[in-house]
Amino acid sequence: MPKFTFVAKNNQGEVRTGKLEEKDSRSVVGTLRADGFFVTSIIEEEKFGHISSQNKWKIFSGISLKDKMMFARHLGVMLSSGLSVPRALNVISSQTKSKKFKNVLAKIEEEVKTGNTLADSLAKAGVFDDLSVNMIRVGELGGSLEEVLVLLADQLEKEHTLISKVRGAMYYPTVIFVVMIGIGIAMMTFVVPQLTAVFTDTQATLPATTEFIISTSNFMAGHKLVVLFSCIFIILFIVIFFRTKAGKRATAFFSLKIPVIKNIVVKVNTARFARIYGSLLKSGVPVTESLSIISETLTNRYYQEAFKKVGLGVQKGKPLHEELAAYPKLFPVLIVQMVEVGEETGKTVDVLSDLARFYEEEIDQLTKNLSSIIEPVLMVVIGSAVGFFAISMIMPMYSIMDQM
């Protein structure tokens, strides 16, 4: 039998939490009601708990966030127009340009035709995250799938916009840095050897910096394959390292230590929390399950761990704002206070929506300011590199010419 995690209260305000094995959720509600308790949250572990572990390495594998956003948008419109789920999936599959997504949709369509729910079919496909799967499951159970799909599409659109802004701010410095490294390698491999011949012919005494550049250039020019494979190895190592647990842990640690980056990380994760949590609550997902989904959706390790602990605290009956307040370095005072207001007034969804918009606007301004900060820093770095090369290689040539 499936296992259910529950939170329940009685008329005296006493909170009971735990796990029960019953044939369905109604049996759990009946058992607790017989003891005088009313269920406030119930989660079937078999449906929710294992989705994340099964698809941990498949989430977003090769399917863009934009494709998923358009899928949710189009599916909602088609279902509202009266099309059946299999027919709508077939139409979307015929219109998508991605071959991989086309194959995924074909498999989902077959699963639905065999009697599986849309949510279970999406989970089985392995390319949709817990957020999408659970929102759709709640929509199917509540008979509001079309509304939930519209809500999901809006959520994915906001997520896409947010990620695009952050990535866009990093493209410029990354391109400049890569080009600078490429030019440096080309100079050391092809240009410096030509200048070295001049110094060799004159047998002049060279400064230490010039000797260092010449030695490095000789090695690179004489071992081009070694340099090439070393560059490839370093790139692959960096890419693979940052996908490992140690790499993610290091990234999360340093991103919360560097002043400018920390501000962006905190605001991005706060905005995502407010937007995702509000969407889940609005679609009818229980509070504790919503927090569990958020802990799997956010990518920063410290936020993942914080929300797992916050979820346990809320499951025991503690207010959400008190649990968030225990992590002042991760959650600004504003969000703690606003969540408290939402809990007191019963308008948590509206408050979270306002918070998400506020922080998204803050991120927009931060990314613009980041570009303004990075430009002069890059100019100083490039100028220093050019100056070092000029002093080391050009000045000795002028000295040789004066001696002649």
Image (cartoon, rainbow, N blue to C red):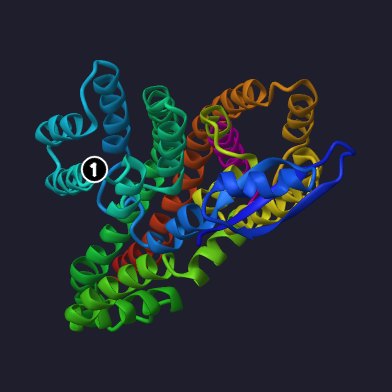
Main SS of the magenta segment? helix
Q: Residue at x 39, y 78 (%)?
A: 212
Q: Quadrant of the C terminus?
A: bottom left
Who is closer to the viewer here, 52 or 211? 52
Residue 322 on the magenta segment: no
Q: Is residue 309 visible?
A: yes
Dot 1 corresponds to which residue? 112
* Secondary structure under the numbered disc 1 in the rendered image: helix
Residue 361 lies, with reference to residue 239, above or below; the image says above
Q: Residue at x 39, y 68 (%)?
A: 238
Crowdedness near tag 1: few (<14), some (14–19) or many (≥20) residues, C-alpha within 10 Å? some
Q: Quadrant of residue 337?
A: top right
Farthest left residue? Answer: 94
Residue at the location (39% across, 23% down)? 150
Residue 42 is situated, as x and y percent measured from the top left of the image, at 62, 46
Q: Position of residue 395 (x, y in %)?
A: 38, 63
Please state the extent of the stretch shown in magenta in the rendering: 257-278
Magenta includes 275? yes
Q: Position of residue 386 (x, y in %)?
A: 38, 55
Q: Quadrant of residue 387?
A: bottom left
Q: Residue at x 57, y 23 (%)?
A: 357
